[in-house]
Amino acid sequence: MFIGHFAPAFIARGATEEAPKLGLLFIAAQLADWALFLLAIVGIEKLRIVPGFTEMVPLDLYHMPYTHSLLGTAVLALAFAALIWFLTRNMVAATWTGIVVLSHWVLDLVTHAPDMTIAGGDQKYGFGLWDSPMIAMPLEIGLVLFAYWFYIRRTKGPLVPPLILLGTMLVFQAINWFGPPPTEAGIGFYLTAMLGFAVLTAMAFWVQTTRWHKNTVGLAVSGARR
């Protein structure tokens, strides 16, 4: 799953004005993958390209006990939530941050081949929807569109910036699905993936400057835009 991971960020920001701004939630949504690729660069976690490994994705994620175990993702969630609490002293914001980070493991469990662990052990889990593209593809797009609709419905502001963000997300997902598959897992592949995350996250920071919650009125609107 790629852009589907951002769906919980849209939902969290739409659910309450106390949630962190959209840009921070985009970081939270892909924090586990940011960590995976950074650790892969230095050889701590490992993946390889195996053509035909699944019908949709040729990635064999055979060693990622820290970022994609349930325990490891929970530690990332607690750490990022603690940072948000330290910066805002807002437990609601911290809680939503943790939920969005942890959602990454749950969504990967649905789509991945069995490569997810509970605490980095030998037993691995994954429902394998990457082998069922007629289910996985509409599920991911539907999840994103529902979350985006919820966010737009719960906030107000010009529609062009969030539409540009959504359009870019869909283009990136199309490239991910239908573009030439990677030939090897190396630093170029890792940096390309992180560049994609960075572009979408930067756009989310831009979008958050243009929208605010519908129950934010009067002089509070200018503060909500910051």
Image (tube, grey):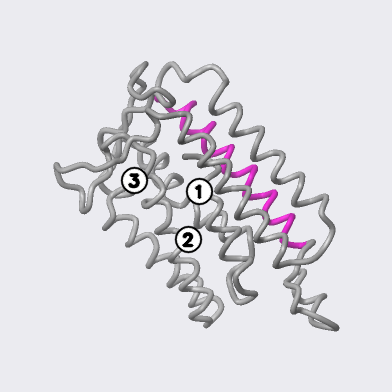
Task: Please tell me whether residue 188 is drawn above or below residue 105 in the rendered image.
Answer: above
Task: Please tell me whether residue 132 is drawn above or below residue 144 in the rendered image.
Answer: above
Q: Which element carries disc 1, helix, strand or loop?
A: helix
Residue 6 picture location, percent across and down: 55, 51
> Mark 3 touching mark 1, by CB under 8 A?
no
Disc 1: which residue: 5
Q: Which element carries disc 2, helix, strand or loop?
A: helix
Magenta stretch, overall SS: helix
Q: Range of the magenta residues?
A: 185-209
- Position of 110 compared to 166: left or right? left
**In the rendered structure, which amino acid carries the disc numbered 1?**
His
Residue that appears at 64% across and 40% down: 169
Specify the label residue 109 is tagged with.
Answer: 3
Pick whichever of labels 3 and 1 is earlier in the sequence: 1
Residue that appears at 56% across and 58% down: 9
> Mark 1 touching mark 2, by CB under 8 A?
no
Task: Rate crowding at label 2 as few (under 14), some (14 to 19) or many (20 or more) other CA atoms within 10 Å.
Answer: many
Residue that appears at 72% across and 63% down: 153
**In the rendered structure, which amino acid carries the disc numbered 3?**
Leu
Residue 158 picture location, percent across and down: 84, 58
Task: Please tell me whether residue 64 is drawn above or below residue 217 in the rendered image.
Answer: above
Disc 2: which residue: 100
The CA span between labels 3 and 1 is 12 Å
Quadrant holding the C terminus: bottom right
